[in-house]
Image: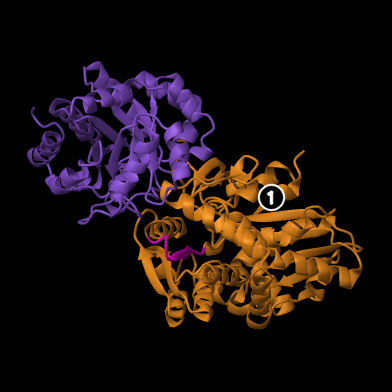
Chain colours: A orange, B purple
Amino acid sequence: MKNKQSVPDKQGHFDDYGGRYVPETLVEALEKLTEAYHRLTKDKKFQKDLEFYLSDYAGRPTALYLAKNLTNYYGKAKIYLKREDLCHTGAHKINNTLGQALMAVYLKKKRIVAETGAGQHGVASATAAKVFGLECVVYMGAEDVKRQALNVYKMKLLGAEVIPVYSGSKTLKDATNEAIRDWVTNVDDTHYLIGSCVGPHPYPMIVRDFQSVIGKEAKLQHKQKLKKSPNYLLACVGGGSNSIGLFYPFLKDKVRIIGVEAAGEGVHTSNHAAAILKGKPGVLHGMKSLLLQDEDGQVQLAHSISAGLDYPSVGPEHAYLKSLKRVDYVSVTDAQAVKAFHRLTQLEGIIPALETSHALAYLDKLMPKTKKSESVIVCLSGRGDKDIHMIQEWDSKNV
Amino acid sequence: MSNPLEKELKTKIENGKKIFCAFFTLGYKSLKDTEEWIRICDKLGVDIVELGIPFSDPMADGPTIQDSSQYALDHRIRIKDAFSMVKRLRASGVRVPIIFFSYYNIVLQIGLFDFVKQLKSSGFNGVLCPDLPPEEDDRLGVLLRRNQMSQIFLVAPTTTEERIRKITKKGSGFIYYVSRKGVTGKQNKLAPKIKKKISEIKKVSSLPVLVGFGVSSAEQVKKLLKDADGVIVGSALVEQIKQSGKNKLKVRKYLENFVQICHPKA
């Protein structure tokens, strides 16, 4: 068996997945980015700068909180929440945008482009761009612009230019195509700040590494509290950045790891976003991974109540971990996620993001199988303020 | 090792001709239309037809080709339509070389082996996947070569000399030189350094070099042909078709003009 820690290989392959399926114009830029990234990981000044921004600006380390009420509710293993919702801008996204924007500064780029679905990554990109004095352009599907007016305004306040995308399905995947098209055109002075562990090599690796701060901290914090390793890790998977961030530092440990996809209206319907469970190998956005597609290879639309999970593919490393059976991938429906949203809000006074609520919902299935002596870490990837109107709408329809 | 398409192109070039390649989106504005356009190209003496098979996420394409692809998909154009159409064209004696242009996922879902088999049996002459650089191609190239079909790769303004070597070694038929950074689509000005880049390609390879991306006017074509072996007109042609409605005469004249520029009477 291949050494798990040696992925991706030099070409960016996670065994059968990953790689670099891009127009020729981008190959050289990706090559340079890969070189620069390897150089910067060894650059003490860069690492020190990044540490400073992560701690004093973003608020790291985030707490590993023993959720006593939630633990008592199930009456089984201890439940710890890794509080990424306490990060500046309210989610784990900032770990990656600070890392990549700082890279852009070191690479002397003047401009960053980003794609965004619900607007969370857009806001986190605009924020990082502001603090480093970079120009920022965010592509957002025209449908999403309509649905997420608040985040659009937030980005504008932060000085970013938000460009609505009218092509294709007018959502995240089309915004990603458009961001790539911008980058192809302005490759000399622009860094493409991709928001998840997806896209062509080296992006899945870079985003994983920047997000791994979640797992590294959690591992240390858990050890300090309980003098042992956790028994279970739980995180939601859309593109897969918060989950790979939590999972990666634990892959060699004896821990059961579970990734939760969005089942939307159910994985047996056509309205879901379960790319790992229901997708087939395919190529989109410069990577080979699991992909929701029809028999002709046309990409199908994902569906989830949570905009952040609404992506028809997934990071290639998740597809790889699935193939190794190292991580169990499961799914949770819209309705189950909303129920878990309310539960955490009621029991702990923490309003979780709808994405995160998917991970929390799986506790219903997992907890009865656990023992009191065990412990579970759930990645609380973001806070739910942005989702209040969705919940309001859902609750008014489902009394 | 040259294949039939490559030989044909080289012979033309040796006889003082330039190569004109016309791009059509399959099913824009209908299958019948596309079929007729290819017949017209054959009659007019167009050297190559690049048949764009619509994909839901065409990341290398600008708005014009994106819209035409979306239009075709909305009208339920399927991949199998491409094969049956080319088969029909060949059966009725259409000889113009036809290149299958699409994104790699389309190819991958058919399966490389089946794809090449269907390509061959329907009468295609080669493949171009804009999102498949030579590094990611494990078997497609081998299968194509075995079946005497071409694999066309792109070279971009950002491609280094070292990569040009790699690409020209693996590619066959011709090299598609992308005239500028960016996506497909009409432009008024040609990017600088085209001449220099073409000579870099010519230094290491005997493959014909055709220039595409943003080529739309006769003036541009004349200028490009001083250095290039040929030109590819895509978005501008799709735009012409979009505006033409039912009247094919104007587009026909547009095509004819390029053919005349490329094939000057001796």
- Residue type, numbered disc 1: Tyr
**Subunit of label 1:** A
Residue B49: percent from the left, percent from the top? Answer: 26, 32
Rendered-image quadrant of the C terminus of chain A: bottom right
Residue in front for this viewpoint, A170 or A159: A159
Residue B75 against residue A363 in the figure, above or below? above
Q: Is residue A191 visible?
A: yes
Q: Residue at x 20, y 41 (%)?
A: B225
Identify the residue position indicated by label 1 in the image: A329
Residue B7: percent from the left, percent from the top? Answer: 31, 22
Residue in front for this viewpoint, B50 or B194: B194
Element under disc 1: strand
**Is the magenta region chiefly helix, strand or loop?**
loop
Residue A17: percent from the left, percent from the top? Answer: 60, 43
Region rendered in magenta: A186-193
Residue B54 against residue A384 in the figure, above or below? above
Residue B172: percent from the left, percent from the top? Answer: 39, 29
